[in-house]
Image (cartoon, rainbow, N blue to C red):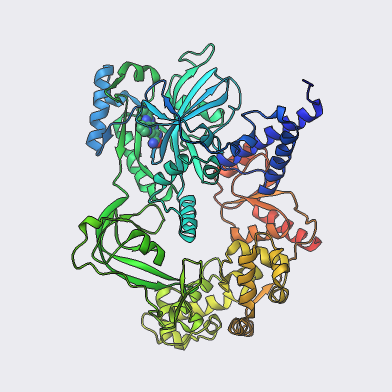
Amino acid sequence: MSQPDPQLLEEVTQLRAELDEANYRYYVLDEPTLTDADYDRRLQRLKQLEAENPSLISPDSPTQRVGAAPADGFPSVAHAIPMLSLDNAFSAEDIVAFAQRVAERLECEADEVEFTCEPKLDGAAVSLVYEQGVLVSGATRGDGRTGEGITSNLRTLRSVPLKLMGKHIPELLEVRGEVIMRHKGFEALNERAREEGSKVFANPRNAAAGSLRQLNPQITATRPLEFHAYQVARIDMANLDDSVMPTHSRQMQRLKDWGFRSSAELKVLTGPQAVVEYCEQLGAKRDQLGYDIDGVVIKVNALRYQRELGFVARAPRWATAFKYPAQEEVTTLNDVEFQVGRTGAITPVARLEPVSVAGVIVSNATLHNADEITRLDVMIGDTVTIRRAGDVIPQVVRVDVDKRPADAQPIVFPEHCPVCGSDIERVDGEAVARCSGGLYCAAQRKEALKHFASRKALDVDGLGVKLIDQLVQLDWVKTPADLFHLTVEQLQSLPRMGEKSSVNLVNALDKAKHTTLARFIYALGIREVGEATAANLASHFGTLQVLQAAELAALEAVNDVGPIVAAHVHTFFRQPHNQETIAALIEAGVTWKEAEVAQGPTPLEGQTWVLTGALESMTRDEGKARLQALGAKVAGSVSKKTTALVAGEASGSKLTKAEQLGVEVVDEATFIERLSQWEQSE
Ligand code: D41
């Protein structure tokens, strides 16, 4: 066999190293470095080189994350050491009792024992085996003794290292952890499934487990899964004794060095009292984590003590799981109402017998659309399971058909808008039904006004939902432009509006007239045009006139704009009532600085900036938009590749990190000075 060309080998090695590094930064550290396009270019190049030189393919190449062919079924895999389960604790007393049992066996005081606390992720437990630093096998937990071999599927997770990073690679390593799906990814997956009429998952845990059990790894590859390590189950390393990694917390640190994600919330605490406080504090943060947890796993930190304590039946004596209240509860569906959104979308909303779900009283839940009602086979009067997690709107996840009362009523989707009486239309192939009333519909008008005045649009201070309701009800405000003709006298005559708040609102409206093109486009509320798309449209076309006149092909040439969004934008600007509204807004004095058209090289091309802390003269969003208009990328976190950090008031960890990495730190005054120089030089 001929030796591969050394230059080729070098290119392949380099590409793999760059892709591995980019993966790690993106999926483990949450600090993206390469852009998606740069990543794809490298991956394509590597695929091409490997296709031309198949002898170069190796199982740890980044190209091997997606490639494997569908399997007929999964082989059984016996776990070398059983995957134990966990005992539960439900109260502070249970935690104290656990610590006392531990202390008794160790013949010490409970207050002296060191514990680790980490969130109990609600996903699917898996085990990964590495030989000589290379992933050789991955399996589900199964019954704890035998699981299913799902190596090809686990390989597709970018947070699963195919090859361990860094130094001191063990000969053998078995890592266990939880595969989870974050709320965002879960919502998007179900949203797509609802549109396509494919399988909708009841919760992220089912979605994670279901995605891992796909016979076709290419499907798993499209699912937003993350692996979070929680245990070193086996390790075989030359010269290794407990002095290197004497504790669970040290092992978790080592796993991070090798390229794994493990909990950022992990803390080492002494005594049961500190553990109880941790559980309370994490419980208060539970809704903001962005992923499901069902409790806290409490472990004795020292491996020596873990061994001394051993296990009973199928659970270790040295660990327990403190459980939070469930995120699913059962209640009765009393009625269904139909809400009309900003774009006329009709959403069926379940009115429920109020029930406490994970500490919050829930009396409404979304039923999404007509197809979802069919899928759930739900009727008024049914006993339903409600799920509430984080910021996600509560959902009806299942119906107990056996408990259906004799007088249960079918849910009838209306044919006319419940607010304005216009026909409800449903486009073939779309899941959503819409009121055809447009801005004649008071519900749509209210939503449009709320959007127009919202923080990321024209940011009108003091224009709340209740006030908008009144203004629309009284017919004082039909389009956003009417807002600018409201007078202090008029406003003052409304209930709960004093002179001061009326003056303030008129002033706020006056101030809101001076905006940016990006905000103005966003404020118009064009379907599918969010903040980012609006900014892209603004910097691409530069002026509203050019955007309004743009044909479909020109619109599709904009970053991130596909045929659907292009069609929405195109249609929007051709509607006479939208043209009238825009003219009326300009007439009322709304102005903006025309955006700089992004043309060719821009002064900050290739640079990555990070903004932190509060700025005095502008919002961070504004600073971000101005940097982007100059060609810079704006990232959320500091890394080696950061060009500079703009540090406003009360900058915290990002500033520290920038200083550690030697990244340039710019204060607000310097930032503003440089911005205006660059903006003029363009
Ligand atoms: O986050 C979890 N779900 C998690 C599960 C965790 N953070 N740590 C865990 N630690 C263990 C022991 C103590 C046995 C190493 C676990 C689990 N077990 C576990 N997951 C499923 C069954 C047991």
Q: Residue at x 64, y 80 (%)?
A: 574
Q: Which image quadrant for residue 257?
A: top right
Q: Nearer the viewer, residue 183 or 141?
A: 141
Residue 120 seen by the camera: yes
Q: Which image quadrant for residue 380?
A: bottom left
Q: Position of residue 182 (x, y in %)?
A: 46, 47
How many marks do you count on the picture?
0
Left or right of residue 499, residue 163 in this image: right
Quadrant position of ligand 1: top left
Q: Position of residue 138 (x, y in %)?
A: 49, 30
Left or right of residue 211, residue 634 in this image: right
Q: Is 469 situated above or below 191?
A: below
Q: Is 63 situated above or below 367?
A: above
Q: Position of residue 615 (x, y in %)?
A: 59, 57
Residue lying furthest front in this view? 72
Q: Is 114 situated above or below 200?
A: above
Q: Position of residue 609 (x, y in %)?
A: 67, 50
Q: Nearer the viewer, residue 524 or 203?
A: 203
Q: Nearer the viewer, residue 160 or 402?
A: 402
Q: Residue at x 69, y 48 (%)?
A: 37
Quarter containing the C terminus: bottom right
Q: Residue at x 52, y 15 (%)?
A: 237
Residue 117 seen by the camera: no
Q: Nearer the viewer, residue 264 or 6?
A: 6
Quarter containing the N terminus: top right
